[in-house]
Amino acid sequence: MTTTPHSYALAAVRARSFAAITRRWSSRSISRDALLMIAQALELAAWQFEDGTPSTASGGADGNAVPAEPLSCLYTADDIAEEGADVHFAAIFRDYVTAAVHRTEPEMPRPLLPLNPELIAQEDRIRTGLELLHSQLAAATDQGTTTALLEAVLALRAKHARLGSVVPLDNARPCFADLYYVAVPDSCWGPYLARRHSTWKVWEIPAFSRAVARQITDFHATLPGLTERFDWDGDDLYFSAWPDSSGEQWDREPVERTHDGHYLIGAGEWCWDEVSPEDC
């Protein structure tokens, strides 16, 4: 089989997903049966992509469209992961689906970045600690014990907030719009940190410095056949979508800013804070 950027992405997501499945067998948030269904969906997707099955999701069977069966299975697995409140699995399948949808882009660089096992382990320890404290609170009978436990809960919640608020980029997906995939070569990425702004999707929306955001949008503008894009006009960022009926003019809207200068995109924000890795 010829190695392509897509097959590289497929191999990467398979290795990462099965490692995650193995690592989280004991998770209380998702059942063993659900994990087996996810594994089966991955196997089906891998087999059909690698085997070159000509089934397509829409449009002609030109060999470039997204195969319908594995994509359907992955959406099913994504639903399972969401219902199980397992954000890490859900992110894995969103990564895979968005990479697959854009498999026709020329010279697609490495699209998937690995989740850091230590960060996942830290989050698991915090969640386990909170569950233990909550059970102790339920059994507490005196005010002194209750106060001490509440202070411990607040401390763990603050630790969890810090863990989610500043995360090195190599633990985030290279996305800058909700479910819209943008692949940027490694040489384009500067030393910056991703910041989580969505409280329900961990590490889904990274935040970029102004300089890196310009690099990303410049690269984005070079990709052919786009129906959505971001571009700059001076210091203002704009989102453009589907051309109008004439096919000549794009519907162009300014990206809203918050009071502190953040750009609201999809479910999250872009934050222009300049942060060095030493600040973690």
Image (cartoon, grey):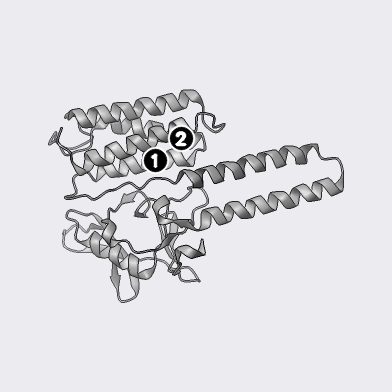
Q: Secondary structure at mark 2?
A: helix
Left or right of residue 280, residue 42 in this image: left
- Which element carries disc 1, helix, strand or loop? helix
Label 1 to label 2: alpha-carbon separation: 10 Å
Q: Nearer the viewer, mark 1 or mark 2?
A: 1
Label 1, residues with CA under 10 Å away: few <14, some 14-19, many ≥20: many
Residue 80 shows in the view: no
The spot of residue 117 in percent (x, y) is 47, 43
Q: Residue at x 56, y 41 (%)?
A: 124
x then y, percent, for residue 160: 59, 51
The residue that disc 1 covers is 92
Question: What amino acid is found at the position of numbered circle 2 in the picture?
Answer: Ala
Q: Which residue occupies 52% across, 38% down? A: 85
Q: Compare residues 12 and 266 and report the one nearer the observer.
A: 12
Q: Residue furthest left?
A: 62
Indicate which disc residue 81 carries. 2
Residue projecting furthest to the bottom:
234
Q: Position of residue 111 (x, y in %)?
A: 29, 48
